[in-house]
Image (cartoon, helix red, strand yellow):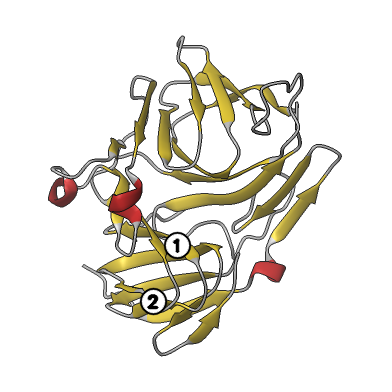
Amino acid sequence: MATIESGIDIRRAADRFHTKIDWLDSKHSFSFSYHQDPANTHHGLLLVNNDDIVAPGTGFDTHPHRDMEIVTWVLEGSLVHQDSEGHSGVIYPGLAQRMSAGTGILHSEKNDSWRIDPDATQHTDPVRFIQMWVFPDEPGIKPGYEQLEIAPAELSGQFATVATGMPKYADEAAIRIKNEYAALRAARLSPGESVVLPEAPFLHLFVARGSVDLEGAGALAEGDAVRFTATGGQRVTAAEPAEVLVWEMHAGVQFG
């Protein structure tokens, strides 16, 4: 087995690819759509980490996916999912969703956010969510869907496993993805609280909210990401109320 050279690669929020149209403000950590950089296609098994804000009453019309495990984590508002396999659901903060595209699936995602107002007659709030794609263990699986609510106490001041196919997290409350080498973990931190990163061949840390201090590397702001290779064990400490998402990956992919 080839040796993986260890390293830490900090990617700042302002350096992400950016798609801005009338109903969508989307920031991409990796090459996506017409934003293409051959040197920035993935990290480990993670192909997409999109930070999306969708305007009220709008969203992604029906579109196809294939051979991808797609995990959606809402930060603010709510999002309606419908797909060609007959699945539908409303995703809100703390509820994780997984869609296995497999042999092919069509789906739509629309803003379902309302202000807390019993007299509201229209969508009034944007929805912000992080959508992440990882490669499945094998192509051509049956399409599928799953959603699960993660209790706030499980996320508070510690890592909760949000999505995984790894046997070591099999007993934890999480949605299942079709990859036995990857796990998504999330934590909500109050100022001064910290979590310790796992050790793995590939890690991807994303600061979804607030700001944190990464041991040995310094301050990270909202939208910043760090790609770790053959390392881990660093402490992440909140400088203000923060939410972090970490992909732990024990395999990688090679294109070509």
The percent position of residue 86, horizontal first and vertical second, equals: 46, 9
In this rendering, position of residue 34 left or right of residue 32:
right
Q: Nearer the viewer, residue 114 or 32?
A: 114
The residue shown at (39%, 53%) is 45
In this rendering, position of residue 64 left or right of residue 169:
right
Query: Which amino acid, by three-letter code, is at mark 2?
Result: Val
When the figure is inspected, residue 145 is found, relative to residue 163, above or below; the finding is: above
Residue lying at the far front of the rendered structure: 118
Return the mark for residue 226.
none
Residue lying at the far right of the rendered structure: 22
Q: CA distance from mark 2 to mark 1?
A: 9 Å
Residue lying at the far top of the rendered structure: 86
The percent position of residue 197, horizontal first and vertical second, equals: 31, 71
Please indicate, yes or no, whether residue 230 appears anywhere in the rendered image: yes
The percent position of residue 87, horizontal first and vertical second, equals: 45, 15
> Badge 1: few (under 14), some or many (20 or more) residues near its Cα, within 10 Å?
many
Whether residues under marks 2 and 1 lie with C-beta atoms below 8 angstroms apart, the answer is yes
Residue on which the image places disc 1: 244
Disc on the earlier residue, 2 or 1? 2
Residue lying at the far bottom of the rendered structure: 216
Q: Nearer the viewer, residue 227 or 135?
A: 227
The residue shown at (32%, 59%) is 248
The percent position of residue 181, horizontal first and vertical second, equals: 25, 51
Residue on which the image places disc 2: 236
Please indicate, yes or no, whether residue 256 appears anywhere in the rendered image: no
Q: Mark 1: which secondary structure? A: strand
Name the image quarter holding residue 195.
bottom left
